[in-house]
Amino acid sequence: MKKIIPKKETQWYQTEQSLTIKYPVSGVSLKKIDFFLADSFLKINITEKNTIKFFDFHDNIDYLNKGTNFLYINDHIEVTLFKENPCIWPNLLVENLSKEQILKRREASTERKKEKEAEHSKNLHDIKIKHDRYSVSEQMRIEKKERDFIENKKKEEKDAALKDLYASIDEDSHLKKQTKNNEIFNEISENYPLEQEEEAIEVIREIPEPRDGKTMQIKFTEKVYPHLAAREQHFKEAPFPKAKGSTSTTKDGDQENPLWLKDKGDDFFRNKDYYSAMNAYNSAFKYRFYSFRFGFICVLYI
Amino acid sequence: MFYIFRKNEKLIECIANRAACHLALFNFRECINDCNEVLEYLSKISSQKEENENLMKLEKRLKARKAVALSWEGSDESFLKAQEIFEDLLKSTNETDPIFNQIKTNYQFFQNRISSIESKVF
């Protein structure tokens, strides 16, 4: 199989309405390339390589079309354009024109482009107002349903309230006696009329008792280093156990008593605080010589 | 001397508890060193050991602790030593002792590790 190597020339192909051009360039990014499109020509400006390339077309081009596209793929610049008059061109570029004529042609097309842009910028303000009005009217149309629904509901409630009011007033504009409308009572009395004159018993619904309170158990997460506060996660040395009311200058018996230190260490061990337990045991072992002699002297005196 | 001996007994417990602290913090070498210190001292006091029940229990607890630390240390020799210690302990203790259950659970963990290692190798 032969290798297919892309050619390094400008290539172009067309349909009735569109036109594509491939121009080979290597080592550039799309952002740094400058394109200038007008009626009759295209200008490509590459600043990194200090090159400018002009394409003077055979016929005019619709430069305001939204389908125009500029790409950079495989070391080629691809340009897709749309034609004003749909037909098939025999050539891409204009022929049989001198340099002066070509320059004049370019100037004329640039002037036409500038005029159009000036017109467009004048009308921008009016176009914006048009769009806003249109969007507001559309929004109103969509929300009309919900607004009507709310208004109808308000009407209904108002009418019902007025009905009740007028029903409770007599012809002589006095308030009527309000009878208790218990639906269940009325049903029962219709089906089972009372034989004797007994006072009717009202149906009382049972109100349930209030709920019992429960105690919530709060569970805290385990600390990484239990001898430190929860907000400190890095390792700090555990403190040596101190007796209450003792400072660094005073030397209490408790602080240097190995038995007291051992009990402290056992308490730390039960609370899973291993660093400070080790400190307590080590200090107990350090002071054992002192207490050894102290105990020996006590025995002698006893 | 009796008064001083009682003090020494408490100090031995300090080192034994320190070994447990090291085990909980995964310092296996230091745990084994502490256990060996206490076991040397107890082997010297063989006559007074039989009188005191606490010291007998201490010895068994320390041996179990040492075996667990040896099994996790990583070398082949320590792994085989741990197995020997476990077997000796299980033979010497009665089932009525409360320590027996603890030793048995440690031994079961040890055996589970052996089976998991074998399944991975083969």
Image (spheres, coloured by chain):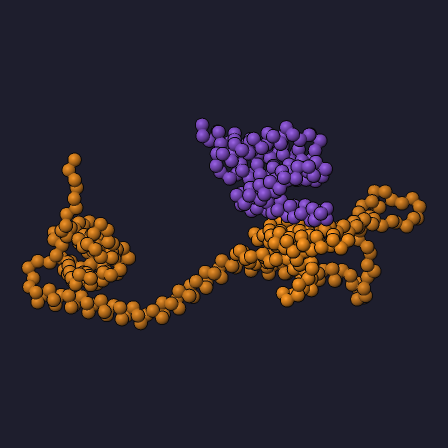
Side of A99 relative to A64 (left or right): left
| Residue A43 in sight in this render | no
Q: Residue furthest right?
A: A196
Q: Residue at x 85, y 50 (%)?
A: A202
Give coordinates of residue A167: x percent, y percent.
Answer: 76, 60
- Camera-side residue of A255 and A149: A255
- Camera-side residue of A89 and B96: B96
- Image quadrant where residue A103 sits: bottom left
Image height of B95 relative to A214, above or below: above
Task: Report the quarter where the C terminus of chain B lies.
Answer: top left
Q: Colour of chain B?
A: purple
Give coordinates of residue B49: x percent, y percent.
Answer: 68, 38
Give coordinates of residue A184: x percent, y percent.
Answer: 80, 47
Q: Colour of chain A?
A: orange
Q: Residue at x 65, y 56 (%)?
A: A290
Total labels drawn: 0
Image height of B40 relative to A213, above or below: above
Q: Residue at x 23, y 60 (%)?
A: A33
- Image quadrant where residue B53 sits: top right
- Image quadrant where residue A279 sits: bottom right
| Residue A119 in sight in this render | yes
- Camera-side residue of B15 and A154: B15
- Camera-side residue of A91 and A164: A91
